[in-house]
Amino acid sequence: MKTFSYSVIRRLGIIGAVLALGVALVACAQPEPEVAEAPANPLTGITWQWVSLTQQPGGMATEVVQPANYTLVLNQDGTLSGRADCNNFSGTYSQTNGFTISLGATTAAACGEGSLDRQYLGLLAAVVAGGSDGQGGLALENAGGENRMLFSNG
């Protein structure tokens, strides 16, 4: 069996140390890329309650008698959910090139006389613009601004 001399072992130790130092320097020179988080949308995560509808021409605003029965929740991932009186709905929304809503699953119970459920769902499906109303609320409009829905933070 051959034995290694002290000088051979010493050389191998020096070579190993140099290699370890080189690996450490390379690792330090290439920082991990930072993953940028999407900015939080100030309209998401809020249970919006429909409080009024302004219709043109004339601009007469109609107050919604029971706003808590007509809600809309926008989620950060582009999905939405809400309540239309006695019915629940879900869907998606986009704030690219305006503001659009695509309604998905909706329950179809008959809510009774005086319910605004069908009107509310129809108005939501026609939305083409929207955003903050500048006073802490949400404003949604259809094409041409004929119908403007205002929501408050519920």
Image (spheres, rainbow, N blue to C red):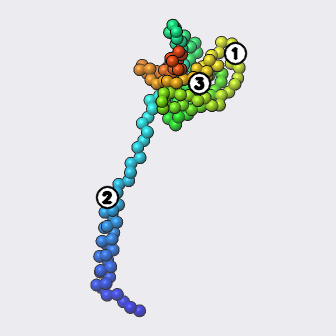
Kindly identify the amino acid type of the residue bearing the numbered disc 1: Gly
- Where is residue 92? Give x, y as percent: 57, 32
Question: Reading the chain from its start, which is encountered first: label 3 or label 2?
Answer: 2
Callout 3: 10 Å neighbours few (<14), some, many (20+)? some
Give the Cα distance between marks 1 and 2. Answer: 69 Å
Q: Nearer the viewer, residue 144 or 116?
A: 144
Residue in the image at 53% along x and 28% along y? 100
Q: Which residue is mark 3?
A: 125
- Closer to the camera: disc 3 or disc 2? 3
Residue in the image at 32% along x and 59% along y? 28
* Residue 101 in sight in this render: yes
Q: Is residue 122 above or below residue 54?
A: below
Q: Which residue is mark 2?
A: 29
Total numbered labels: 3
Q: Nearer the viewer, residue 144 or 130?
A: 144
Query: CB atoms at circles 1 and 2 under 8 Å apart?
Result: no
Q: Which residue is mark 1?
A: 112
